[in-house]
């Protein structure tokens, strides 16, 4: 394979050695060679390293920062040296033709939009059903289908090929411990002039593991509130929409939490809203500081 068509697969894992073994086995069946597989371990299982290093792939094992998924994605990203990369969760399988299909679409679209600015998102087969990229609703839920002629602002993270330097420049927002890190960075990619294109032939399989999900629901709620507000306020500069979201979304979260789990759900939703507000204030301060440095 030509050097400019080389890809690294980054697997961010946490205490799922058996699932990881299956994921690595799927990569060995790829019809297109993989330059490197980076396994970044955010967990504590002593088996994970041995599973990674016993595969027949060119694998590099590293201990992750243990600060959440976005930070782990950035850690793996820092070790990538190929022009392209794919993130694959430790409970996913790479289809044998994913890389060849993604590279084909990448080449066609780079000729049109420019090298280094194209992100190719495929689809994910989850529990037997195909998952397409979907946009966020006003409240931030990714449940809004795209119109046929509508540009994409989002991706399916387990079926996406990125140009490495673009992601290294933007970085994942490490305040996002779990969830919404993919739509947060994809909206910034589009705002920065990048183009997201769909490749319906690139389909990976996702077999959601029940392990290690105890804190995912709460972290996901924080992520939805923070990432959506950040999108409206800082990425898209839609201040009126950001203000409306900032008023309506926390109330909706508390009411939904109460309906689902009573008082405990309401308290958790309120706590998630306060954490998201804190993150939003820090992000705004960081943005002001960055803007000031550029002007000076």
Image: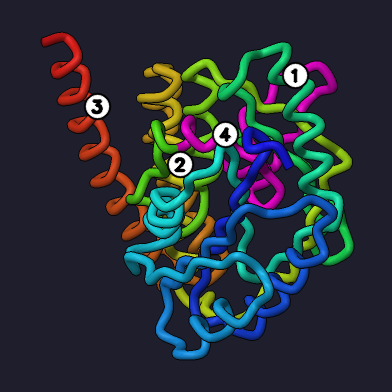
Q: Mark 2 or 3 closer to N-term? A: 2
Q: Name the secondary structure under disc 4.
A: strand
Mark 2 and mark 4: Cα distance apart in space: 34 Å
Q: Mark 2 or 4 closer to N-term? A: 4
- The residue nearer to you, when weighing 192 against 237, is 192
Q: Is residue 231 magenta?
A: no
| C-beta proximity under 8 Å, tags 1 and 4 | no
User: Would residue 248 be seen by someone viewing this image from the given angle?
Assistant: no
Query: Could you say where residue 247 lies in the image, as x and y percent from the top left?
Result: 38, 35
Query: Could you say where residue 40 lies in the image, as x and y percent from the top left?
Result: 46, 66
Mark 4 and mark 3: Cα distance apart in space: 24 Å
Query: Could you say where residue 36 lies in the image, as x and y percent from the top left?
Result: 58, 57
Judge depth for marks 4 and 3 and give the one in front: 4
User: Would residue 31 be seen by someone viewing this image from the given angle?
Assistant: yes
- Quadrant (top left, top right, bottom left, bottom right) of the N terminus: top right
Q: Mark 1 or 3 closer to N-term? A: 1
Position of residue 157 relative to residue 117, above or below, is below
Position of residue 149 relative to residue 69, above or below, is above
| C-beta proximity under 8 Å, tags 2 and 3 | no
Judge depth for marks 1 and 4 and give the one in front: 4
Q: Is 141 placed left or right of 229 in the picture?
A: right
| Mark 2 nearby-residue class (10 Å; few <14, some 14–19, many ≥20) | some
Residue designated by label 4: 163
- Region in magenta: 138-167
* Scheme by which the image is coloured: rainbow
Q: What residue is at 32 percent from the left and 65 percent from the top?
A: 65
Q: Residue furthest front?
A: 2
The label on residue 287 is 3
Residue designated by label 2: 249
Residue designated by label 1: 150
Query: Could you say where residue 189 lies in the image, as x and y percent from the top left?
Result: 51, 27
């Amino acid at each position: 394979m030509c050097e400019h068509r080389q890809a690294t697969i980054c697997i961010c894992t946490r205490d799922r050695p058996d699932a990881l073994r299956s994921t690595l086995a799927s990569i060995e069946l790829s019809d297109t060679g993989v330059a490197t597989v980076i396994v970044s371990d955010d967990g504590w299982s002593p088996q994970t390293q041995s599973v990674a290093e016993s595969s027949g792939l060119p694998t590099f094992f590293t201990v992750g920062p243990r600060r959440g998924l976005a930070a782990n994605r950035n850690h793996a990203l820092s070790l990538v040296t190929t022009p392209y990369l794919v993130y694959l969760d430790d409970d996913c399988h790479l289809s044998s033709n994913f890389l060849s299909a993604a590279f084909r679409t990448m080449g066609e679209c780079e000729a049109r939009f420019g090298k280094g600015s194209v992100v190719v998102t495929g689809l994910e087969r989850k529990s037997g059903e195909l998952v397409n990229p979907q946009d966020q609703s006003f409240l931030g839920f990714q449940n809004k289908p795209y119109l046929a002629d509508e540009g994409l602002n989002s991706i399916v993270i387990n079926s996406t090929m990125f140009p490495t330097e673009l992601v290294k420049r933007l970085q994942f927002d490490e305040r996002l411990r779990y969830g919404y890190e993919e739509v947060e960075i994809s909206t910034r990619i589009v705002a920065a002039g990048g183009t997201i294109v769909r490749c319906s032939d690139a389909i990976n399989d996702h077999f959601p593991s029940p392990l290690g999900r105890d804190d995912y629901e709460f972290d996901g709620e924080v992520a939805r509130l923070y990432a959506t507000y950040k999108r409206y306020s800082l990425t898209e500069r839609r201040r009126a929409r950001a203000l409306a979201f900032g008023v309506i979304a926390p109330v909706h979260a508390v009411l939904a939490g109460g309906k689902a789990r009573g008082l405990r759900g309401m308290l958790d939703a309120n706590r998630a809203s306060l954490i998201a507000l804190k993150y939003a204030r820090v992000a705004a301060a960081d943005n002001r500081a960055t803007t000031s440095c550029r002007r000076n």
